[in-house]
Image (cartoon, rainbow, N blue to C red):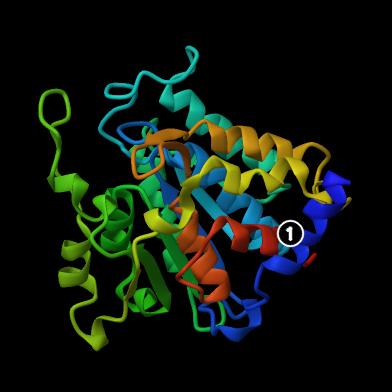
Amino acid sequence: MREVCLFFLLVFSFPTYLSAQNPLWQGKGRIVISSDGNEHDHDDWAATPLSLAIIAARGLQNKLSLYIYSDHIWGSNQEHPGVDGVTPYQQMRESAVNGGKMFRFNSTRFICAVDNPEIAYESLKEEINQSTSENPLFIVVAGPVQVIGEAIARSEKGKRKFVTIISTTNAWNNDHADKPYGGWDKHSGWTLDEIKDNFAKTESDGLKIIQIQNQNPCLKRNWKEYEWLITAPERTNSYYKEGSWTWLFNRLCMSIKPVSEAENYYAIDASDAGKVIFLLTGIEKTSPELCYEIMRNPKP
């Protein structure tokens, strides 16, 4: 009886507003995501697999041409010790590479930037240089923008007008390259403001940069708000690989953090996935419920 009640709660309590927005994604082009997760915060351990699941739910696996992960190119495993002996570097490999297998990203290139930044720079540059009006490129910022900035700097100027960067306002990712923490963390590199000043200052520069609202309040939520991944009837939908929803829930739980407010609770932080949801739906005010609405109605 509990599962029946939960089914009706899930199906009928969430608003059906996906079609009311005007998303950036109009069915053509390619998507690139660049995330960190190998150092400092561990939200990308969750945001990476959730982003993959959302893209897969829309049947767009073949549109994600490149996934750059561990893009904190200046080092790994220093500030955060990892979980149960699994380092942040290893956690990101599990979330990205195994996530790609779990949600059938058979043609996507997964590149670990910290292993060889040059490969990451050149791979993204090549994606930019392939861009046209009929084959635009959308780059989702989910880590420091050093890799993105360097790739743009190396790209053909005439191709940048077909490229859109999606970030959030006042985000750590936007300027961390020039704001290291000190000690072992000493570096400089591209910031989002520098990318704007060099490649998007005027309309004639071509590059488009879109900053949406901070996604922390939207997707850094009580872990119970993601519990549908292990209870909803759609978790057994044949569209998805068996066990993929449970695997995703377990990956999300790797990001759990204590939150002290009026009521103490533990939060899953998958905030960077909000930019992927915005790209595909046009919705800035994302939520775990919106993630469920997308995933329970896959569009092969």
Which residue appears at 30% of the width and 33% of the height? 40
What residue did someone put label 1 on? 10
Does residue 123 appear in the picture of this structure? no
Is 227 placed left or right of 258 in the picture? right
- Relative to 155, is 29 on the left or the right? right
Left or right: where 209 falls relative to 299: left
Answer yes or no: is residue 26 visible.
yes
Residue found at x 50% / y 44%: 222
- The quadrant in which residue 206 appears is bottom left
Give the residue furthest to the front.
262
Pick the residue in front: 207 or 169: 169
Measured from the top left, where is residue 290 in percent x and y?
60, 63
Q: Position of residue 45 (x, y in %)?
A: 49, 37
- Is 145 placed above or below 86 here? below
| Depth order, front residue of 171/253 | 253
86 vs 139: above or below: above
Residue displayed at 72% across by 36% down:
246
Whether 75 is drawn above or below 7: the answer is above
Quarter of the picture holding the C terminus: bottom right
Identify whether 2 is placed above or below 133. above
Q: How many marks?
A: 1
The residue lying at 20 percent from left, 46 percent from top is 176
Q: Amino acid at mark 1?
A: Leu
